[in-house]
Image: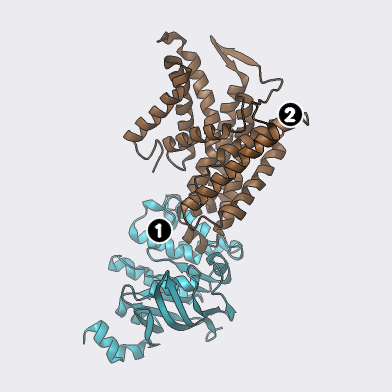
Chain colours: A brown, B cyan
Amino acid sequence: MRPLAELATPVMMGILLGGLYATIALGLSLVFGVVNEINIAHGDLVILGSYFGYVASTALGIDPILSLIIGAPLFFALGFAIQKYLLNRAFRISMDATLIIAFGISIILENTYQLIWTPLSRGLTTSYSVESFDVGTIHVPLVYLLDLVVAIVVMFCLHQFLRRTYLGTAIRAAAQDWKVAQLMGINTNRVYALTFGIATALASISGVFLGLTFPFTPVSGMSFLIIALGVIVLGGLGSIAGTFVAGIAFGLAQTVGGYFFGVAAQMLVAYTMVLVVLAVIPKGIFGR
Amino acid sequence: MNGETLLKVSHIDVFHGSFQALWDVSLSVESGEIVAIIGANGSGKSTLMEAISGLMHPARGSIEFEGHAISSLEPFQIVVRGISLMPEGGRIFPDLTVLENLKIGSYNRKARSESAENLQRVYELFPVLQARKTQPARTLSGGEKQMLALGRSLMSDPKLVLLDEMSLGLAPRLVNDLYVALREIRARGITVLFVEQNVRRSLAEADRAYIMETGRIVLSGRVEDLREEEKVKKAYFGT
């Protein structure tokens, strides 16, 4: 065991890192909440976002964050197409059908990354990716701060979109009762494609910040998918606020757990926390 | 406008999987009418409503609205044409506010321009909805939820509303309120086709009625004639 006085650093890092986890989990949560699909390929789409940033910065010399101005709409179109042409045809059959299709997409993506970018570990390096600043005695990397800021901005925008726009209301209606939503004149298949598109655009954003924070390989998607699944289950399925709080709780459990029990045990601590919380509140922190 | 055939259902068979729920059902509704469908639980009334609104598709037969075939269209395409279903149990969106529920009722493109006007009319019909407009719909009482569901179905600017058991499980006073609203709706030129288990009520409110048993229409006609039918008397009034 190490002294408690040094705990401030892992707590700070856990909160900031939790922002990244929340952003990664948000797209998964949105698709589950609205379309009732578990998108197993979500982690791989996030990593596609990381590679997009990688290509933009190494081959084209564009800042990876700025590249999202083009990247996010492109990813939206990709997600829209995946739902429209693949998943919409399957999801009324059973939840398993979409799960298997998403799993297939995941395998195809991972192998494509291996072919194009090799299994070597990559990272996004920019002028600011090594910068840091001090808060009292705590040393904070700038990128970690960005992770939290982006999480807050993205969640706020999504919340406003769902609350304040006609389309956002239609998405919430379709999530609650798709048959009656159709009776209202809502083309639910189109709403699902739009939702999956938004989730994929969110994946591109989280992918770029993931690449700025951690090195990644073609198979990194699966480990982040598992984190994201833990986060949305912990937060309460389909809740934006829950996803945010759970992302931070997950980040904290990981860094603080790592601090006390060593890096090897940090995921164990995080998942033990998920299990304990679910044993006490089965619907998650913000579950209904 | 009155007297033209608005809805024409011809010889439809509808299946739930391998179970046949409707057998050779035909029915027509003229514009301006109030028509009732009467029958016990499981007689196929709701299935008929679902087939007209596009939630179910008939295996055989045709459904025409204003002379156009609609039986292969999806619900969101049918509502644009002017048919609005208030489903059994109301099925309001519990996590949307009252106002959001009403606004989503005019989601179809044709209804959007009329949305503000229709909202005002719904508030006139059910002032309690205006008072509760910012509340989540799940906080409403049973009667208010049915008012919201009926109001929502009027927001799509319909020519024909289908009401599936709108008064089921409500106190008599609330049932009366809903039927007062129904007459109001007719006065505005909207045609009504409603499903009801209460035979007395149906025969009192409608111009014509169809009586269903086990997926078939067994009797139909003007309500004053039906009241005199021996079969109806025996089955429903016990005389």
Residue A10, image x and y in percent? 49, 17
Mark 1, residues whose alpha carbon is within 10 Å: few (<14), some, or many (≥20)?
few
Q: Looking at the image, which residue is at 37% across and 40% down? A: A283
Q: Is residue A76 left or right of residue B29?
A: right
Q: Looking at the image, which residue is at 59% across and 56% down? A: A190
Amino acid on which disc 1 is placed: Val
Q: Quadrant of residue B22?
A: bottom left
Confirm whether circles 2 and 1 share one chain.
Answer: no
Q: Is residue A19 above or below residue B74?
A: above
Q: Is residue B174 left or right of residue A149?
A: left
Q: Quadrant of the N terminus of chain B?
A: bottom right
Q: Quadrant of the C terminus of chain B?
A: bottom left
Residue A158, image x and y in percent? 56, 41
Find disc 2 in the rendering and name its residue. Answer: A57
Q: Is residue A204 left or right of residue B202?
A: right
Using the rendered image of the protein, determine whether residue B83 is visible from the camera's viewpoint: yes
Amino acid on which disc 2 is placed: Ser
Mark 2, residues whose alpha carbon is within 10 Å: few (<14), some, or many (≥20)?
some
Q: Looking at the image, which residue is at 42% across and 66% down? A: B87
Residue B218, image x and y in percent? 36, 86
Q: Chain of mark 2?
A: A
Residue A6, image x and y in percent? 47, 10
Using the rendered image of the protein, determine whether residue A199 is visible from the camera's viewpoint: no
Task: Name the residue nearer the viewer: B194 or A271.
Answer: A271
Task: Name the residue nearer the viewer: B225 or A245.
Answer: A245
| Alpha carbons under labels 2 and 1: distance apart | 59 Å
Find disc 1 in the rendering and name its residue. Answer: B128
Q: For the view shown, which residue lies furthest in the right direction?
A: A60
Q: Looking at the image, which residue is at 51% across and 19% down? A: A12
Q: Is residue A261 above or below residue A173?
A: above
